Amino acid sequence: MKRARAESAAWTAVLVACATVALMGIATFMLHVHRDWGGRPSMVTRQSATMPAAAAKTRPARVLVPKAVGATPHEGAHDGAPAAGPPVVTDAIVEMLRARALTIPVSGLTAAALVPSFSEVRGERVHEALDIMAPTGTPVVAVEDGTVARLFTSKAGGLTIYQFDPSQSVAYYYAHLQGYASGVVDGATVRRGQVIGYVGSTGNANPAAPHLHFAIFVLGPEKRWWQGTPIDPYPVFR
């Protein structure tokens, strides 16, 4: 009898010990849960906090969509990584363009009809282009051989053409067009003097004063058709 009682007492002690360990485990688990959801971020929160950095390494780069291009082709920079740096415009580049004897981009006009407007302040920006006044529908011609880098429509520039020169180091920008000439599409090859569009007043141009907004800019190493360092066209033509 005494032996049975001893065995019963031993089993009772074992059960009490097991129950105590189990209760301590539960208490510890509840303490961690309380700390995760109370005084510090939970594991889910911590993972979420680190996801942007990891995702940035794997997500595809954003498509660079130009904002509304204003009076200058390089205006309205795109989202994304910054360019390697703006190209430097030197006298040699200006002289190179003058040596090419670029064609006046509005048919029937000579350099004597041009009026400088590159440095004029237009609202909160500098013009950085040349306005060439002409009646609506007057043919606009390519200033030299090259490639149509992009046909683009913006709120400010209206119907526009970006043309690369043969070396793709310089771009020409024609804005406020009434329309494009037949066959002028993205990637098309154009020749000096070829009609590529027509003078108009699309975009933010005054309908009572139709004109061609013409700009020249030096491209960076990325060859972005919308971005570059502007050159005053007036001394190039003169």
Image (cartoon, grey):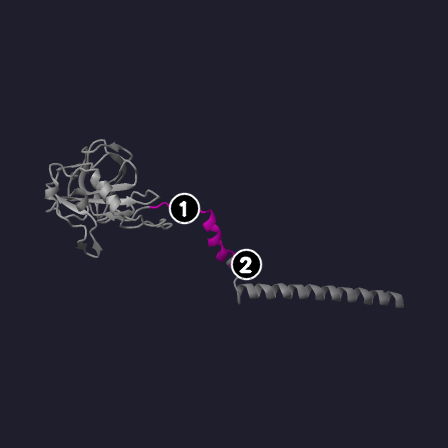
Would you say residue 61 sits in the magenta stretch? yes
Where's residue 58, x and y in %?
A: 47, 47
Q: Which residue is mark 1?
A: 61
Image quadrant for the N terminus?
bottom right
Q: Is residue 156 above or below residue 25?
A: above
Q: Considering the image in quadrants, where does the C terminus appear?
A: top left
Dot 1 lies on which element? Answer: loop
Residue 102: quarter of image: top left
Question: Image point 54% across, 58% down: which residue?
Answer: 43
Q: Is residue 210 left or right of residue 93?
A: left
Relative side of 67 to 43, left or right: left
Q: Residue at x 50, y 56 (%)?
A: 50
Classified by dominant secondary structure, the portion drawn in magenta counts as: helix
Which residue, given by chain and number where applicable, does mark 2 sit on? 43
The stretch of residues the image draws in magenta is 46-64
Q: Is residue 217 above or below residue 196?
A: below
Report helix, strand or loop for mark 2.
Answer: helix
Percent x, y for residue 110? 11, 39
**Along the line of sight, the residue nearer the viewer: 69 or 85:** 85
